[in-house]
Amino acid sequence: MRAARESSYGVVATGNAAFPGAPNGPLGATIAVPTGMVGTPALWGPGAGTALVNTMGLPVTSKEVDPMHARHFSPMILGRRYEDISVVPGRRQVNATFNVPVTPDAFGFWLFMTLGADAVTATTGNGGACALNALIAANATSMVITTLANNLSVGQRIFFRDTTSVGGLGTNPEYATVSVAASSGATVTVNFNGGAGTAGGVKFGHAISTLVEFGPWTHTFTPVNTPAGTPSFQIEDNEGGIPTSKFFTGMVIDSMDLSMPIEKDADPFVATVKAIGTSVNPSGSQTNTNNTIASPNVGGAFQLPVEEVPTVPGNFATFSASPTGGGPSNVDATNLNPVTAGGVAPKIYVPDFKVNLTNKAQLAKAQNSSPDPYAAIFTNFACRGTMETLFEDYSVFYDYVRTQLWQGTQLVVNWGAQNLVGTTGAQSSVFTLNIFNFAIEKTGKSASKSELVYFPVDAWRAVDNGPNTAKNFTTLLSAVLTNNVAAY
């Protein structure tokens, strides 16, 4: 499935606004039919125009998009029953459900759309630390960095911000890949390939003092607490590359369920996304007569980069109690071994967990005569879930139960495979869910199986009060993801 970010509700974001620089380089392809994860097809989507639109290929295991065409009632009084006046399709709403394998870069899109705010830091060059010592021309395969703080490894991603403004984006941001290891220092030459230019060079020229970053990047997503709500997006419900693929606009996330299962040890970490949006016309489809590529997914669909793999089977989460301090003192699993009594590290096993992030999104219309929703509104954000914890013996279990009622907690999942390259070489993508105030609502009965104590937590939630008063109410949680995309 392909998706494009919208600049405003129902209006697609063109140019670099959606996924800055991603179509240019190793994460994408800049041809009419995008074969990379991120592409820039022309004339994409409903009411196709002339601008290039950045779209991201999102892997899904299943999807359902169901038009919900409510009847259009007229408020006019003509001496008859008002509902008899206009029996036509009214609000062109759609409900959608996507089952998503959690892969590093694509999952960042879903987190951003669900939570809405993203603070991102680079492994090297964050905050303007790395700048070009001299301009480079289009198709260049090397550059000189004024100051390089950390060593670089072959395979690290490079993000050219194409601006001298810290945190800003120029007209032509793009990606490349480090091709030769480089040591830190002043005026360091960095060789690269994998760009969108000739022979793997950069596609665009970049001026002196242009800022560059080296990945992986760490994203911290937090819930948006504003009337504007979270971002919206468009999707194509493609059916075999036919030119009458269904398009939907104004898509917003109503809820997202995260599930790390243990019941079936061959299952990966998965997410179920529920969204609402708008049909592009009463029938819910569009014939792309003006679309020069017929369908964005024609010709073999998109191809995921090597690092886009779901978490490996059996890769359960670790549970760190009270990451801000003050947690229990007799729980230990420092080396990811079953917990033993007498330790000091507040970390235990969570063989499985489920998390529900809810925006409670609704579509509103401007007036009775309006056939379409005009905006999305969000009633309130909530986080609830279930989990099962694992202890080596009852003494550790009782220590945990006695202390872990209102704490800050972390659920940490890594991809197992070392699918990223950092300054010290290969590393794994990591996803961490920080619950700033974690409350247990309901627990099951502990059971001893295979000399281990299993303790089911049937209901827990993120709460807006508790001992962690520094972050309550406005920020119930944050989701931290390390991957190879610098901006969403």
Image (cartoon, helix red, strand yellow):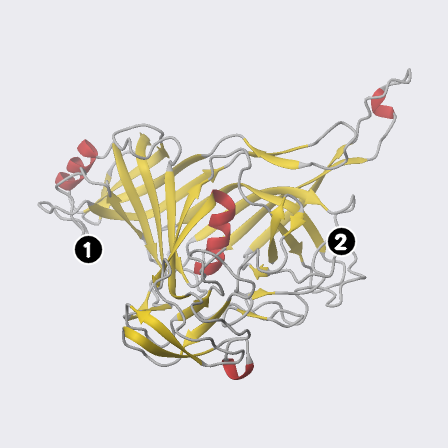
In front here: 189 or 196? 189
Position of 246 with respect to 110 (left or right) is right
Residue tagged by mark 2? 47
Mark 2 or 1: in front is: 2
Q: Position of residue 364 (x, y in %)?
A: 66, 32
Label placed on residue 182: none
> Label 2 amino acid?
Gly
In front here: 322 or 43? 43
Q: Quadrant of residue 166?
A: bottom left
Element marked by disc 2 = loop
Alpha carbon separation for disc pair 2 and 1: 56 Å
Position of 400 with respect to 21 (left or right) is left
Q: Position of residue 238 (x, y in %)?
A: 67, 59
Q: Is residue 211 visible?
A: yes
Taking the spot 78% from the left edge, 46% from the top edge, the residue there is 283
Taking the spot 83% from the left edge, 35% from the top edge, the residue there is 88
> Label 1 amino acid?
Asn
Q: Which residue lies furthest to the top in this view?
A: 79
Quarter of the figure that contains the N terminus? bottom right
Element marked by disc 1 = loop
How many numbered discs sit on the rendered protein? 2
Judge the density around disc 2: few (<14), some (14-19), many (≥20) Cα neighbours within 10 Å.
few
Q: Is residue 312 visible?
A: no
Q: Where is residue 160 in the image (x, y as percent from the top left)?
A: 46, 67
Against 431, residue 52 (above or below) is below
In front here: 473 or 101? 473
Q: Earlier in the sequence, mark 2 or mark 1?
A: 2
Q: Where is residue 181 in the image (x, y as percent from the top left)?
A: 32, 79
Residue tagged by mark 1? 337
Against 251, residue 42 (above or below) is below
Q: Quadrant of residue 447?
A: top left
In front here: 258 or 169? 169
